[in-house]
Image (cartoon, coloured by chain):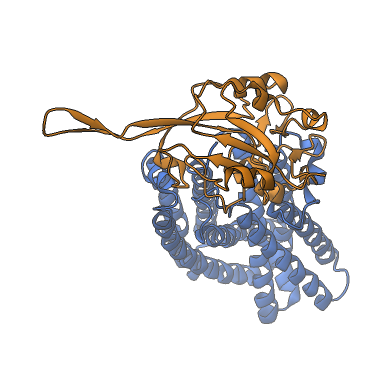
Amino acid sequence: MNVREWALITFTILAQMSVGSFIVLGVVHYFVGKKSGEKQADELSDRALLAIGPVLALGMAASLLHLGNPLNAYKAVTNLGTSWLSREIFFGVLFAVAGAVFAVMQWKKIATFQIRNLVAILAAVIGVALVYSMAMVYMMPTRPGWNLVTTPLAFFTTTLLLGVLAMGAAFVANYWYVQSKNPGCASEQCVLLRDSLRWFAVASIVLLGFQFVLLPLWVALMAGPATASAAMLVGEFGGVFALRLAFVFLGAGVLGIFLFRAASSPGQEKVMGTVAYLAFALVLVGEVLGRFLFYATATHFGLQ
Amino acid sequence: MAKQLGFYFDATACIGCRACQVACKDKNDLVVGQTWRQVVEVSGGSWTAQENGTWATTAFAYYVSLGCQHCEKPSCVEVCPTGAMTKRADGIVVVNAEQCIGCRYCEWACPYGSPQFNEAKGVMTKCNFCEDYVAQGKKPACVDACVMRALDIGELADLRVKYGSVAQIDPLPAANLTRPSIVLTPHAKSSTHGDVKKLALDKGGMK
């Protein structure tokens, strides 16, 4: 492991978290808007939306650190015809642009609600294309531990899991901010916050279940084409793998249950907020460790 | 104009002296860690006790000398995000350092270890078939350096007529992956697992 690989870990995790956050935010905004009106929905999610941009920008900046010659980086979108890496960067830039356009429109309330919705859906679709391209980059016969159906599935699971929990933490931060500025108006927001976090807790537990199917499946599929990778994962890196499982289990599972319970009982906002922060932090560490293992256990097919 | 140039290698003649590797390093002024041409020793077999108290052996060793295969379906060209890696009209695969961003994606994609990263320059480098020599009607440095005349170059179609169409012996991966432009005369003991991990390989510690 070196700077170059940490750059890739940082980029893939942050970019996937941005896409996941954007999608989760869109879904929440849609349902809250239907239930409580657009104004309340905006109040709940607008500030969280602005947090996504810097995360994506940080991730894309980190990706430059894995290049030997970063000054040429702008040329990396010129082989869209055959290179998934080109497509990844293309969709990354496109997602950043579409997301930024939507964020500005939403923040300044430019154009109608319907037009903004269309832009948001377009940005979300580009985000999905980005995560898919990110996965396809690793689908090569020469990298048998990656060239498995579990790679795209795991990338999308990480995307949604981090998206849900990042937005949970962002909503809590937003709520404290709204309350500090205007203590009275927060009650409706408080109900919406609790509703959202309850759903986030359910989603994170479901996604955790999915991940706990994917991980053993990955190990099983590696046996044969990438036995050495599987052996590294449970042998040399067994400790990190156990930590990775423990962090995600504690964050998304155990704290998910606590989060659901705290969000279900009015007056428990302080506990709920702390749990939401902690759950996000634990899952983020768990996912970073998971991505570290993805790179660290890779083996090459052929001569090197 | 050549359609697809390729290398020929005779595994029955090679003695593993690595003169080709050194000639390549010298001609292309390669830094430590870069070996555009590599000689790999492949060994295997075992000893079994016989009833009469003697031992029988199946032990064997042979060498394979490899530059870039200048594949007909080069995975490095396919994955390169900038188009720095290209296949010329004569089939030679070259990397343009001006275009390269040093993402090392081609290194992941190549099953022959051909694209190699130059840390100091931050870009990929690889065997270019000694294109300058070839343009002058000469042969690549590795070919001329071979004391056993185990290496040669030529139009791939001609090489196939002359030497057959074997393009895959251990330790080389399955030829259908990238369709390498190489013709091999296999060693008597060479097999074709298509997976190097099953054999003992030794690069002789040369960097």
Above/below status of B26 relative to B42: above
Q: Nearer the viewer, residue A289 or A78?
A: A78
Q: Does the rendering let one see residue A186?
A: no
- The quadrant of the image that shows the N terminus of chain A is top right
Residue for point 69% across, 55% down: A84
Q: Position of residue A142 (x, y in %)?
A: 55, 48
Q: Nearer the viewer, residue B127 or A64?
A: B127
* Residue A78 x, y percent position in the rendering: 81, 51
Q: What's the colour of chain A in the image?
A: blue
Q: Residue furthest left?
A: B52
- Along the horizontal axis of the image, is B96 left or right of B143? right
Which of the 4 quarters of the picture holds residue B36?
top right
Q: Picture coordinates of residue B144 (x, y %)?
A: 67, 24
Drawn colour of chain B?
orange
Q: Is residue A175 above or below residue B190?
A: below
Residue B108, percent from left and from top: 60, 43
